[in-house]
């Protein structure tokens, strides 16, 4: 039996009449019928809609469902809402773009709910280049993290170079175990290369010992180097981790790690990657991350974007709480955890087909998540996106919140595009984009980032090659600008 | 399609910011674009060269010093007091280069005996390939032999396969 909001599945209010229900059911079934909708997940949605209608169209079952909802006093536990770049669009014989700013938050007061336990594994790069301040700072950060473990948390540490060792297996947050764990951490020293697959595999094996649907299961990967040749296998492991409900976050130290790969790896699991521009920041990053994990209201959020006929999802980006790209080739989009008192915001970019006059559904956003502290799994929330095409379109300004998010996203996208152009050998175009970005950043008051972009443009013109450090600073710097101000508990990467 | 007023790039109808230059593409009828006011001190600041925050894991350099950090080993060589340094690896039968990288796996990494030169020119540092067998790279692109190119502190140079980070305070 479907859980959660059955009326939401049919996009009708709870008091809908039997006739309205029938009409809504026909409409919804037509949108997601396997014969017309090939998008992944459409068939499953179609079945859910049919089950919901079976219940709601039977007066006895509907009454029983309504009573159950009323007695338990719970409706949907999460809310999902979208703000569109336009509510109406011109009926045109050409494709057009539609943006949605999606906000997901708790639909019930969550502040006093108990905190979920965290099942954590730290996977630490111990290659030669980590020696010195990097490893010293990482050791200090891990020691502090162990100190802050709560009794119900578990933590293990794996150190890897071209081989992986378990520094200590999963330990509870108890005083004697903490002392032992910290002693083990202090013995860590660096030698060898960086093979992320080995660390990842070993780390996931350690996590599996305590894998629990009632906990936040998380792997934190720290590295300062590139891994060669095992990226594909790492992505496979990440996909498996996501299925098992494990999220992976990454911290890249210095300027030699592969940001694109780490972004892909972590976002496939709902996690994100942070740029640690200077080793002494590791401690704060790690502390904020673990604090965030332990404050989850929802966990393992998975969003299916069920597209209507001929609509394409071109781009998906998580703006908050941890900014980062999401892969539109994967379904569902994994969004990680929803911290108490915060919301998750996403930018979705759709490409609509040529259209004639009339209202048209664009996509259904079907969210599922585990609400750990209430011990509820697979809780759902649904949002439908639709647009009205009109022959006499009068342009209206897009909503301010969406413009705000998109103007920052456009700055981030501009630097991404500059690196792409540079990688494809078009230094002239890359240089121009960087200097344009500098101007835009300056106009929005981001003097430091603006200087960096302009100076990198000059340098690119002169040397025809990129500086990796500046590239990462601009990438993660413009990304951090997207966080709504004032920033939530986690500190954005310093630029 | 719509055309970006700033860079003429073609965009889909409904796009809000040009994907090529970030210019705003929507307007409200009757609205005039606001005039931007710049603080001139900010513009002056823009013309100053950019100094990235130095990493705490590199030693502070005194004026006149150049540091070479060999990737992988992380070993640091400090250069000071000469107008030119020849980078290479020592072999028994020939003159030693000024900076012998032989201790840093230079031979296996294809560093020539006289591979490249660093030259101090006023407050600039120039790098020149001395016709090495396996080439010299600056931040990933190969240098033409005998043609000096100006370095910036923090640049990464590659001699054959040996990667060296150059920082200086001149």
Image (spheres, helix red, strand yellow):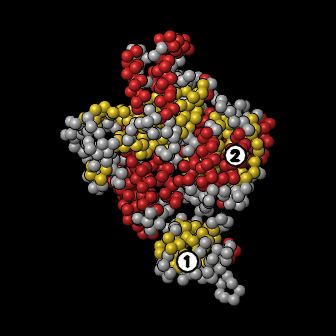
Indicate which disc residue B135 carries: 1
Establish if A371 lies above or below A129: above
Q: Position of residue B60 (x, y in %)?
A: 59, 62
Q: Position of residue B16 (x, y in %)?
A: 32, 44
On screen, residue B30 versus residue A414, left or right, reads left
Instruction: Give me the residue at 40% from left, 19% from top.
Output: A21
Give the residue at the far bottom of this rendering.
B93
| Mark 2 burial class by Cα count in 10 Å: few <14, some 14-19, many 20+ | many
| Mark 1 burial class by Cα count in 10 Å: few <14, some 14-19, many 20+ | many
Q: Between residues A261 and A479, which one lies in front from this camera angle?
A: A261
Establish if A239 lies above or below A104: below
Q: Between residues A387 and A341, which one lies in front from this camera angle?
A: A387
Q: Chain of mark 1?
A: B
Q: Position of residue B74 (x, y in %)?
A: 65, 64
Give the spatial CA distance, label 1 vs label 2.
41 Å
Residue at label 2?
A203
Instruction: Give me the residue at 43% from left, 45% from top.
Output: A315
Instruction: Give me the residue at 50% from left, 62% from top.
Output: A467
Indicate which disc residue A158 carries: none
Is residue A493 at least partly visible in the picture? yes
Is residue A285 at least partly visible in the picture? no
Establish if A41 lies above or below A261: above
Where does the N terminus of chain A fall, quadrant-wise? top right
Residue A92 picture quarter: top left
């Amino acid at each position: 039996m479907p859980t959660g909001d059955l009326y939401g599945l049919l996009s009708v209010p709870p008091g809908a009449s039997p006739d309205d229900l029938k009409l809504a059911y026909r409409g919804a079934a037509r949108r997601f019928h396997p014969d017309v909708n090939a998008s992944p997940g459409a068939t499953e949605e179609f079945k859910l809609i049919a089950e919901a209608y079976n219940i709601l169209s039977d007066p006895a079952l509907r009454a029983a469902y309504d009573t159950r909802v009323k007695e338990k006093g719970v409706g949907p536990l999460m809310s999902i809402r979208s703000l569109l770049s336009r509510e109406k669009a011109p009926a045109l014989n050409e494709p057009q773009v539609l943006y949605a700013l999606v906000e997901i938050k708790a639909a019930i007061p969550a502040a006093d709910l108990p905190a979920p336990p965290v099942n954590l594994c730290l996977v630490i790069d111990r290659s030669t280049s980590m020696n010195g301040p990097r490893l010293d700072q990482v050791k200090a950060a891990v020691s502090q993290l162990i100190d802050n473990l709560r009794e119900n948390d578990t933590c293990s540490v794996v150190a890897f170079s071209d081989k992986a060792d378990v520094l200590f297996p999963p330990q509870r947050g108890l005083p004697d175990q903490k002392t032992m764990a910290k002693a083990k951490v202090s013995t860590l020293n660096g030698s060898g290369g960086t093979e992320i697959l080995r660390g990842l595999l070993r780390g996931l094996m350690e996590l599996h010992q305590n894998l629990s649907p009632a906990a936040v299961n998380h792997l934190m990967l720290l590295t300062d180097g590139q891994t060669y040749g095992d990226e594909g296998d790492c992505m496979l492991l990440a996909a498996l981790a996501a299925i098992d409900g494990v999220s992976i976050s990454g911290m890249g130290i210095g300027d030699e790690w592969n940001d694109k790969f780490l972004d892909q790896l972590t976002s496939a699991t709902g996690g994100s990657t942070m740029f640690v521009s200077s080793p002494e920041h590791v401690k704060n990053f790690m502390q904020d991350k673990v604090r965030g994990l332990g404050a989850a209201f929802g966990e393992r959020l998975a969003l299916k974007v069920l597209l209507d006929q001929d609509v394409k999802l071109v781009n998906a980006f998580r703006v908050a709480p941890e900014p980062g790209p999401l892969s539109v080739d994967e379904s569902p989009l994994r969004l990680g955890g929803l911290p108490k008192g915060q919301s998750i915001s996403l930018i979705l970019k759709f490409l609509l087909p040529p259209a004639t006059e009339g209202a048209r559904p664009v996509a259904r956003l079907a969210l599922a998540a585990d609400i750990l502290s209430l011990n509820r799994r697979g809780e759902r929330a649904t949002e439908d996106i639709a647009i009205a095409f009109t022959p006499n379109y009068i342009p209206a300004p897009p909503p301010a919140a969406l413009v705000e998010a998109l103007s920052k996203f456009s700055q981030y996208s501009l630097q991404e595009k500059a690196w792409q152009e540079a990688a494809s050998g078009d230094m002239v175009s890359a240089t121009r984009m960087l200097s344009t970005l500098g101007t835009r950043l300056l106009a929005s008051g981001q003097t430091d980032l603006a200087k960096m972009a302009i100076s990198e443009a000059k340098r690119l013109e002169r040397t025809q090659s990129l500086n990796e450090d500046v590239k990462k600073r601009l990438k993660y710097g413009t990304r951090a600008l997207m966080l709504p101000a004032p920033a939530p508990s986690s500190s954005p990467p310093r630029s | 399609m719509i055309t970006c007023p700033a860079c003429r790039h073609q965009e889909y109808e409904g796009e809000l910011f040009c994907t090529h230059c970030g210019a705003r593409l929507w307007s409200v009828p009757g609205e005039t674009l606001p005039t931007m006011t710049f603080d001139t001190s900010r513009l002056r600041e823009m013309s100053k060269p950019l100094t990235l925050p130095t990493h705490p894991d590199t030693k502070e350099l005194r004026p006149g010093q150049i540091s070479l950090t060999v990737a992988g080993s992380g070993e640091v060589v400090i250069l000071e007091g000469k107008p030119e340094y020849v980078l290479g690896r020592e072999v028994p039968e020939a003159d030693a280069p000024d900076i012998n990288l032989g201790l840093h796996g230079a031979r296996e990494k294809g560093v020539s005996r006289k591979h490249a030169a660093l030259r101090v020119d006023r407050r600039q540092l120039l790098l020149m390939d001395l016709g090495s067998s396996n080439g010299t790279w600056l931040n990933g692109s190969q240098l033409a032999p005998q043609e000096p190119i100006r370095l910036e502190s923090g640049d990464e140079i590659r001699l054959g396969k040996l990667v060296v980070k150059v920082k200086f305070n001149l």
